[in-house]
Image (tube, grey):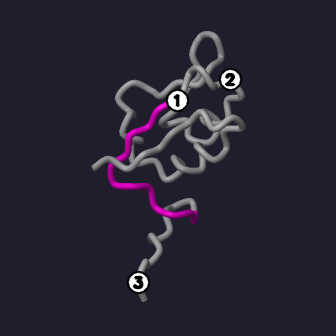
């Protein structure tokens, strides 16, 4: 069978990419905080309440919740791209 699915990660979802580039579009972010609630090891909120990637976690930190955090953003401000 071609196109086999990724093995499940610890949360039961698809395993995160081995390396990713994570970013938040600050012009779009409304500060809902869903990214920080979903993947607190990767995201935080800045002093104004807007989402931010934690320093040193721009690669996603191997978080199994990375893509779920992107999906949870109500305005799609979180981007996760597989690094090449």
Element type at mark 3: loop
Residue 25 placement: quadrant: top right
Q: Give residue 18's position: percent from left, percent from top.
A: 33, 54
Element type at mark 1: strand
68 over 10 or under it: above or below: above
Number of labelled discs? Answer: 3
> Quadrant of the image for the N terminus?
bottom left
Per the model, the C-alpha gap separating discs 1 and 2 is: 11 Å
Q: Which label's residue is closer to the chain start, 2 or 3?
A: 3
- Give the crowd class for mark 1: few <14, some 14-19, many >=20 residues within 10 Å: some
Tell me what residue is drawn at x 33 percent, y 49 percent.
19
- Give the crowd class for mark 2: few <14, some 14-19, many >=20 residues within 10 Å: many
Residue with the mark numbered 2: 31
Per the model, the C-alpha gap separating discs 2 and 3 is: 40 Å
The rendered magenta stretch, by its main secondary structure, is classed as loop
81 over 16 or under it: above or below: above
**Residue 10 or residue 34, whichever sits in front:** 34
Element type at mark 2: loop
Tell me what residue is drawn at x 72 percent, y 38 percent.
74
**Residue furthest left as drawn:** 84
Numbered circle sitting on residue 62? none
Residue with the mark numbered 1: 24
Residue stretch in magenta: 12-23
Residue with the mark numbered 3: 2
Q: Which label's residue is closer to the chain start, 1 or 2?
A: 1
8 over 38 or under it: above or below: below
Per the model, the C-alpha gap separating discs 3 and 1 is: 33 Å
**6 in magenta:** no
């Amino acid at each position: 069978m071609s196109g086999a699915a990724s093995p499940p990660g610890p949360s039961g979802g698809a395993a995160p990419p081995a390396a990713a580039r994570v970013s938040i579009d600050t012009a779009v972010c409304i500060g809902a905080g869903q990214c920080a609630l979903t993947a607190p090891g990767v995201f935080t909120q800045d002093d104004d309440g807007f989402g931010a990637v934690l320093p040193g976690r721009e690669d996603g930190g191997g978080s199994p919740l990375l893509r779920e955090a992107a999906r949870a953003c109500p305005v799609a401000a979180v981007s996760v791209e597989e690094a090449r």
